[in-house]
Amino acid sequence: MDSLTQLALGATVGAACAPKQHRRSAAIVGGMLGTLPDLDVLISYQDPVDNFTRHRGFSHSLLVLVPAAFFLWLLACQIFDAVRTQRLRWFLVIALSLVTHPILDAHTIYGTQLFWPIVAPPLMWSTIFIIDPLYSIPLFISTIYVLLKPGGQSSNTVVACGLIISSIYLLWSWYAKSIVDNEARREISLLGIQSPVFFSVPTPFNTLAWRVVVMDGDQYLEGYYSFLNSDNGIKFASFPSGNHFYDVLTQSEGLNRLRWFSHGFLELRKIDGKLVASDIRMGAAPDYVFRFVLAKDQDAGLVPIPPERLRTPYTWDRVRKVFDRI
């Protein structure tokens, strides 16, 4: 999720776990810890593909964050009297503020390496868009309230409501996804595709309209489902996937890593003599957020080059199309 939401989640969780007299301090600590894992974006790796695929790696691993929480708690116990007198509560403040960050991130389509360094494609439950106001606003309200009135009689109620409402919305996203996936399987079976590989993901800022993508050999299918227009089902459009380029670029480390990271949801296309790999999980055909030039035409054919990131502008026209789909 976006960093502001992670800050608000950490602050709300911290305030919920802390003793009443230290609720504001716990909210501040929780907010800081809630954004800490995302500082891995400041690390510059070998190339743009590495930067893309290593984000949400070690800094989002439960195998790293749980020991880190324990270490920070021990350190805080040595420094602060308030922590020593309420050890369990402050351990919960530190630990839950940290681990809720990657667990929430795993609900997005980008994916999260929750068990790094175990080598496995990132978990991507894809039940919620990276920015969703209906999830975030209750957490923002509870964070602001507890910072302004930490000792108020209604502080507990506001914090609890923030967590309960946002959690119920997250549960709804799982239920909504199950409905969309069942409808997608039904529609895909009518197309005669056996053992389909597909994903569903909410369109930006909501959980009412969903995008469904199906891989089918040398093509992929893209369709949309809206709960406000469910009678129309899912109408798929097909696009070339460029799978034949895999045989040409078997030695491309960038391509192999993108294929692993994206769970195989890639589009390979030649543009102006360059081979562009697009992660089709994020964006919509034909415009995708993460695109990389991996090779270019030479006399001997396609030759791998150091990966280059291609930027895709996101215009308000695309936002309008989202509301049209809803």
Image (tube, rainbow, N blue to C red):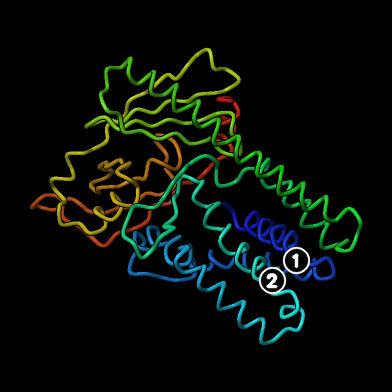
| Residue under the point 61% across and 34% down | 172
Task: Find residue 197 and report its image quarter.
Answer: top left
Residue that sits furthest to the right in the current view: 153
| Residue under the point 58% across and 33% down | 207
From the top left corner, tell me how far across and down residue 198 is, in percent. Answer: 36, 33
Q: Which residue is mark 2?
A: 90
Q: Nearer the viewer, residue 185 or 323?
A: 185
Structural distance between the alpha carbons of marks 2 and 1: 6 Å
| Residue under the point 36% across and 61% down | 48
User: Dot 2: what SS?
Assistant: helix
| Residue under the point 55% across and 25% down | 325
Q: Is residue 14 left or right of residue 223?
A: right
Q: Amino acid at mark 1?
A: Ala
From the top left corner, tell me how far across and down residue 28 is, in percent. Answer: 73, 68
Q: Which residue is mark 1?
A: 18
> In the drawing, what numbered circle is on residue 179?
none
Q: Nearer the viewer, residue 326 or 58?
A: 58
From the top left corner, tell me how far across and down residue 126 is, in percent. Answer: 48, 41
Choose the circle earlier in sequence order: 2 or 1. 1
Does the CB distance between marks 2 and 1 fall below 8 Å? yes
Q: Amino acid at mark 2?
A: Trp
Q: Nearer the viewer, residue 123 or 203?
A: 123
From the top left corner, tell me how far across and down residue 224 is, in percent. Answer: 47, 25
